[in-house]
Image: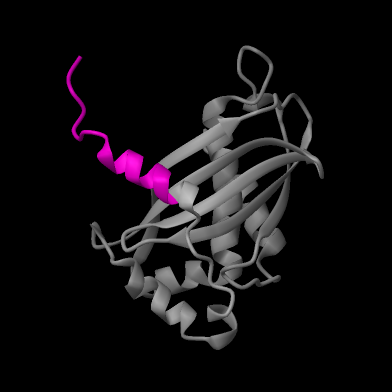
Amino acid sequence: MYPFIRITTQVLRYKSRPIAPWDTHVSHHRILPWDLDVMAELNNGLTLTIYDMGRIPFAVRTGVWDLFKANGMALTIAGSSVRYRRRLTLFERIEQRTRIAGWDSRFIYFDQSLWTDPETCAGQGVFRAAVVKNRKMVNIDEVVVPLVDRPEIHANRPHLPGWISAWAEADNARPWPPERV
């Protein structure tokens, strides 16, 4: 079941602490019994859900959530690439870092990572998000322009790293729809 209570708790915890859209949102989570798979480690599907628990409060803290709601827009994940580098086990405490890595004309790219201590990254995810309105994708410039109009935000605008651009290009080269096997 989707962790609505955990996400709501995260939103309430950070809602009164706004950050700029280019800042990093840092949150803390604990691996709970229902997060585990049969190998007694964080389930790979629930790892994606934990990344949701970073992106949603990030959107609230930056004001993007309110901007979207006011304009009838929503953010939807359109692709992801996740690296798993260390097992996360029962009751382990993790720090999650969420930031916007940049964008292109169609997508906003989030860079998120899970840390067990300041030196040990357990995993990293890159998420490509589309903005939708009335069931159609919105050009990213329509979303970003109201945010970067403010000089203090524009000064820190991230430029999409080459490795994320390369991943996006490779993903776009993949045939769609896939071949029936």
102 vs 10, left or right, is left
> Residue at point 18% right, 33% down?
177
> Residue at point 71% right, 27% down?
88
The picture quadrant where one finds residue 116 is: top right
Residue 37 vertical position relative to residue 149 in the rendered view, above or below: above
Does the magenta run of residues contain 135?
no
82 vs 177, left or right, is right
Residue 127 vertical position relative to residue 131 in the rendered view, above or below: above
Does the magenta run of residues contain 170?
yes
- Horizontal and vertical percent position of residue 23: 64, 66
Residue 113 vertical position relative to residue 74 in the rendered view, above or below: above
- Whether residue 42 is visible, yes or no, is yes
- Horizontal and vertical percent position of residue 165: 41, 51
Q: Nearer the viewer, residue 171 or 57?
A: 171
Residue 123 vertical position relative to residue 70 in the rendered view, above or below: above
The picture quadrant where one finds residue 175 is: top left
Q: Nearer the viewer, residue 56 or 105?
A: 105
- Horizontal and vertical percent position of residue 101: 53, 58
The quadrant in which the C terminus is found is top left
- Horizontal and vertical percent position of residue 119: 81, 41
Colour mapping: one colour
Instruction: Tell me which segment is drawn in magenta.
Output: 165-181
